[in-house]
Amino acid sequence: MQAFTITTLGCKVNQCDSSALLTLLGRLGLSQARPGQPCDLVVVNTCCVTAPAMRKSRQAIRKALRQSPAACVAILGCYATYHQARLRQMLDELGVSSHRSLIAGHHKNVSAKLGELIGQCSTIKCSTAAPGCENLHSQQKHPQPGAAVLHETPANLPARRNQAIASQAVGTTNLPLVDKFAGHQRAFVKVQDGCDAFCSYCVVCYTRPRVTSKTIEQVLAQCRQLISAGHREIVLCGVFLGAFGRDTAIRKRWPANEPAMLPELLERVAQLDGLWRVRLSSLEPGDVTERLLDIYASQPGAAPHFHLPLQSGSGRILEKMNRQYTPEQFARTVETLRTRLDRPAITTDIIVGFPGEDEAAFAQTLDQARVAGFAKIHAFPFSAIEPTAAWRYRHEAPKPEVVRERLERLAELETDLAREYRRQFVSETLEGIIETTKPAPAISQAMTDRYLTVQFPADLPTSQKTSQKKPGSIVSLRIDSTTPTGLSGTIER
């Protein structure tokens, strides 16, 4: 049996795709290589949302080839869509011929292309008796629309986007359902893919343009499979999760009398037997409706954790970003969450140094963060990506030294806000799922429904040494104090 490795960069949706690829390759008779072990197939699922993400993707490819220089190489994901020509040049420079390599972005039939690569490479033998192989060979004989080779570059992405939207076989839609997230207590389920909202800084609308969703029954079937495999927590993911069940992410194009499907999906998943918690990966203010909040208030299985990307607290900058909300709408959403629910965890993303951001605009971002009382802030420096709209006015961005100083100020505020949020749970009892148990030092870690990590002694008295110590177990934890990054406590039962 031949070995492969998968390296994943970027978002939770990419993690879902990589887990599906792992399932596919396992069904084809391949085995995942142990850490440090040379392998026959290298798979890198790339990201291009920022320039650093592209650089890390290239570094991951080089690192994998240093470890397995004779391996076949499959480069997938957004960067493979964004700049195939540059990646092809890099592989040529590394001595990896097209015969043993594949660059397939989201506009390709990934399953079929992987099957072709496996068939081409003499180091990997794919038996037609292996489950799934027959389907792959069939796809190779009868290629689907959209599978033609095109050397993508940033310049031809807009034209490629139109072709992709018309295609019926786009990207990873034909990958198998994930059987299990090995080594993880939390499982991710991709319920929606694609975005056409065109935030001015974001290249994803070019690399994942076609808005698609699974049906509720498909999602429930996958969730049941993951629960039966031992997962007690599930995260529902999407590129634009609020567009679940829609054919566009542009809100003004949604029929006014058509109810959102996301609340129904959340409710039905939250009611599944054997599930501890379900959480939504990311929302926007417009997604937080009364119907959604009713479900959070009535379903204990719905985790009160909301990731609401703010990006900027300036109305002027949000408009320039082409975001679909105002600072006032964002603030009202946060206030509504706090009114309806008990101390929900609200986390966010903020872009620092967007073109046109002056000191007054950044001060508005800090003010919004203080009012929101974020439990966590993920801060990113602006990254100009061709051919986004922001690329055209990148010269208006603040100088790098100004951006660094603002990032430092935001990091200081984030530390204070996160500490204040965690502090209110000291002396209370929280429920959590054990993620890790380490003998040395004898400390275990659990995650609460509000996405707070709790460290606690793993070496319990003999009378308490039960199965609850194992990863995946649900425990009640008495919170004793805060830590620099989380909480510290002890098991109550």
Image (tube, rainbow, N blue to C red):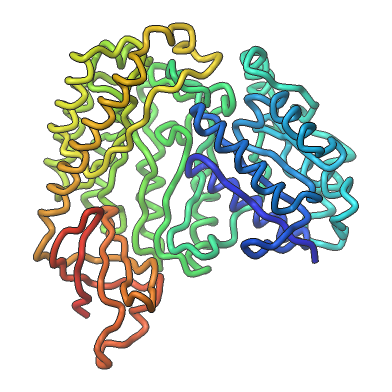
Q: Residue 153: image x %, image y %?
A: 67, 19
Report the quarter where the C terminus lies.
bottom left
Which image quadrant is residue 481 in? bottom left
Residue occupying image coordinates x 13% and y 32% = 371
Q: Residue 408: image x %, image y %?
A: 25, 32
Residue occupying image coordinates x 40% and y 68% = 274
Residue 83, compared with residue 136, is above or below; it is: above
Residue occupying image coordinates x 38% and y 15% = 322
Q: Is residue 154 visible?
A: yes
Which image quadrant is residue 478 in? bottom left
Q: Residue 305: image x %, image y %?
A: 28, 47
Tell me: 326 left or right of 20: left
Tell me: 90 left or right of 443: right
Q: What is the number of callouts on the image?
A: 0
Q: Is residue 299 visible?
A: no
- Asked whether 283 or 415 is in front, the reply is 415
- Asked whether 39 or 127 is in front, the reply is 39
**Quick one: which residue is furthest to the front in this view?**
401
Residue occupying image coordinates x 87% and y 58% = 125
